[in-house]
Image (cartoon, rainbow, N blue to C red):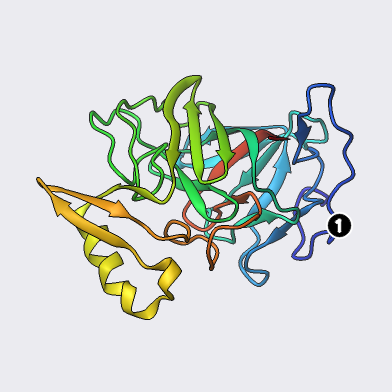
Amino acid sequence: MRNILLAAFSLVAPSVALADDGWRPLFNGKDLSGWTFRKADAKKVWRVCSDVKLDPTDPTRLLPIGDGGKTNAVLLCGDDGRGSDIMTIEQFYNYELHIEFTVPKGSNSGVYNRGLFEVQVFDSFGKNKPEFHDCAALYERAKPRTNLAKAPGQWQSFDITMKEKRLSLKWNGETVYENIDVRYGETDKAAFDRLNQENASKPAELRVKLEEKEGKYVGFFGEGGTRSGLEGADRPGPILLQGDHGPVAYRNIRIRAK
């Protein structure tokens, strides 16, 4: 079936003309040309479809609808969502990214900018106070002040701007972060302890310098990415979509250089 994505994707980024306003799609609605698996030998759970819906017999799953093929088609990480992350072959540094997503009940994914800095995708619907692992968190570095999460199965959007070391985010059209430095922030006690313990095994540029101040854990997170990002210090990198933590669907993925 043409919708079941094979283990080996095209090694050439798709040739897509720029729109008049500079935006161009990263997903062609037909297949994963221009994308690759992070783990080629992982279970194949990604597929193209026209839309998705919650499984009426299991609200923790998403079911595909249709065969895709159009520009508004959906890229589904289906089944139990325990496959591989996928990432663009092309690399980016300064850009604006628009992406829409939906998750079933309890599911978890993420959008990694430059393959390093994760904006969390999570079912945070109904939570009163978002934390560092909730939807729209800059994972373990910043958290939304307000929970804008929609119910499982509903479509949501991120508009992300990366400019040098700074990130801005709109979530469902509302500003969450404005030009925050991805190297600095706040985290929770568990991450604080883990990151400090990991320092000894890291090169100098990736080490954190965090401290406790008035009950908060704040400071410098190094020049590398958030947890589970690609290795190394900040540099041009891919758009990476997490595909090993649970079902998720993405659509209308487009980018514009800044």
For mark 1, what is the residue?
A: 12
Give above or below for 126 relative to 214.
Answer: above
Foreground pick, 187 / 14: 187
Foreground pick, 238 / 61: 238
Residue 173 picture location, percent across and down:
50, 19
Q: Quadrant of residue 63?
A: top right
* Left or right: where 105 falls relative to 165: left
Rendered residue at 64%/49% (across/down)? 239
Rendered residue at 23%/28% (across/down)? 128
Q: How would you rate the neighbour count of disc 1 (Cα within 10 Å): few for under 14, some for 14-19, many for 20 or more?
A: few
Q: Residue furthest left?
A: 214
* Left or right: where 126 falls relative to 153: left
Quadrant containing the C terminus is top right
Foreground pick, 38 / 200: 200
Rendered residue at 51%/60% (across/down)? 229
Amino acid found under the numbered disc labelled 1: Val
Give above or below for 134 relative to 125.
Answer: below
Residue 2 picture location, percent across and down:
83, 50
Give above or below for 1 relative to 73.
Answer: below
Foreground pick, 63 / 258: 258
Q: Quadrant of residue 126?
A: top left
* Left or right: where 119 falls relative to 7: left
Q: Residue furthest bottom?
A: 201
Residue 168 picture location, percent across and down:
49, 33
Element type at mark 1: loop
